[in-house]
């Protein structure tokens, strides 16, 4: 039955099969390795092997099984960052935005290893060996999720009717968010400034100047009205 094999060897072979796109064969190796680890009482190793199984299931197109396996892993081993991030990507694809953000926040804030490595999509696909489709979901979550958060910060009322200081505060927040976004999608800072910030600063600078001149004009009219004899 193969249960006398070294589970580490089975995991390595599963990794190689996954790299070749033979995900169904990889699942078999990962499942057997998981069983051996559990029999030997090595539960963290069993969780890691089962996480590999979940990724292979996803790569094989067995999405439902993959998601259930991911959920089972985080229930038994909540400290496994990989599966929280994977669930964030899955939930994002399903339109479950709150669940996606919850899983991502847990991975980033509640686990000591953090989530920084998962912002590097090359690491996710080449080193961690995520299936490309799942990695693309993660990229979408990191990119579009951040852009949605930035958009939510921008209120037309604040831009056109709020205080200058409030508007500048939002502007600084947007700039910081855009810099973070550029690192997530792996664009160099220099390219990002030349392609993105030029247009941004022209538009925002125009709005700020318009607001200042509008305020000066309003103050001038108010001052003239006060000096006008009754």
Image (spheres, rainbow, N blue to C red):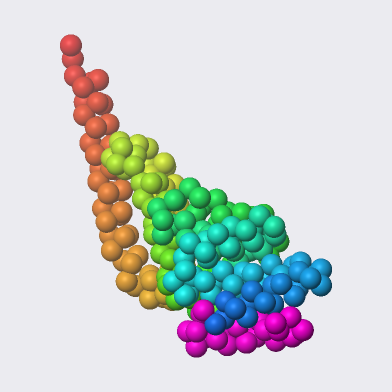
51 displayed left or right of 97? right
> In percent of the image, x 30 and y 54: which residue is there?
205
Identify the residue at image location x=51%, y=80%. Answer: 23
In front of the other: 103 or 177: 103
Q: Indicate whether 40 appears above or below 142.
A: below
Main secondary structure found in the magenta portion = helix
Toward which corner of the image does residue 104 lie, by quadrant? Answer: bottom right
Point out the image quarter for the C terminus. top left
Look at the picture and state if 68 lies above or below 214.
below
Tell me if residue 37 comes above or below residue 203 in the rendering: below
**Total marks in image:** 0
Give the image quarter of residue 212: top left
Q: Position of residue 39 (x, y in %)?
A: 79, 71
Q: Which residues fall within the magenta stretch?
A: 1-24
Q: Is residue 108 visible?
A: no
Which residue shows up at 29% across the image and 41% down it? Answer: 156
- Residue at 50% from the left image edge and 54% from the top image edge: 100
Give left or right: position of 1 versus 170: right
Q: Return the residue found at the far top.
A: 230
Extreme residue in the right direction? 41
Question: Hey, which residue is sitting farthest front in the picture?
Answer: 1
Q: Is residue 195 magenta?
A: no
Q: Residue 10 magenta-drawn?
A: yes
Quarter of the picture containing the N terminus is: bottom right
Q: Is residue 1 visible?
A: yes
Of 6 and 98, the residue lying toward us: 6
The one of 41 and 162 positioned closer to us in this rendering = 41
- Where is residue 120? Give x, y as percent: 52, 73
Could you say where residue 153 lies in the image, as x and y percent from the top left? 40, 46
Left or right: residue 183 compared with residue 213: right
Tell me which corner region of the image, top left, top right, bottom left or bottom right, holds residue 116.
Answer: bottom right
Q: Is residue 5 left or right of residue 120?
A: right
């Amino acid at each position: 039955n193969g249960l006398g094999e070294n589970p580490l060897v089975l995991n390595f072979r599963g990794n190689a099969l996954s790299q070749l796109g033979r995900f169904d064969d990889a699942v078999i190796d990962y499942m057997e390795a998981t069983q051996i680890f559990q029999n030997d009482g090595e539960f963290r190793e069993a969780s890691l092997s089962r996480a590999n199984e979940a990724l292979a299931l996803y790569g094989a197109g067995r999405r439902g099984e993959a998601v259930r396996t991911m959920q089972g892993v985080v229930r038994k081993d909540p400290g496994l960052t990989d599966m929280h991030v994977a669930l964030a990507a899955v939930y994002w694809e399903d339109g479950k935005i709150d669940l996606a953000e919850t899983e991502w926040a847990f991975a980033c804030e509640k686990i000591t290893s953090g989530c920084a490595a998962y912002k590097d999509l090359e690491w996710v696909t080449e080193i961690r060996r995520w299936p490309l489709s799942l990695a693309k979901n993660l990229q979408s979550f990191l990119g579009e999720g951040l852009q949605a958060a930035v958009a939510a910060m921008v209120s037309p009322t604040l831009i056109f009717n709020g205080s200058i200081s409030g508007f500048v505060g939002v502007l600084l927040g947007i700039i910081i968010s855009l810099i973070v976004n550029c690192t997530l999608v792996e664009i160099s800072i220099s390219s990002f400034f030349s392609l993105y910030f030029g247009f941004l600063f022209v538009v925002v600078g125009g709005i700020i100047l318009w607001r200042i001149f509008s305020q000066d004009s309003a103050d001038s009219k108010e001052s003239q009205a006060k000096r006008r004899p009754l």
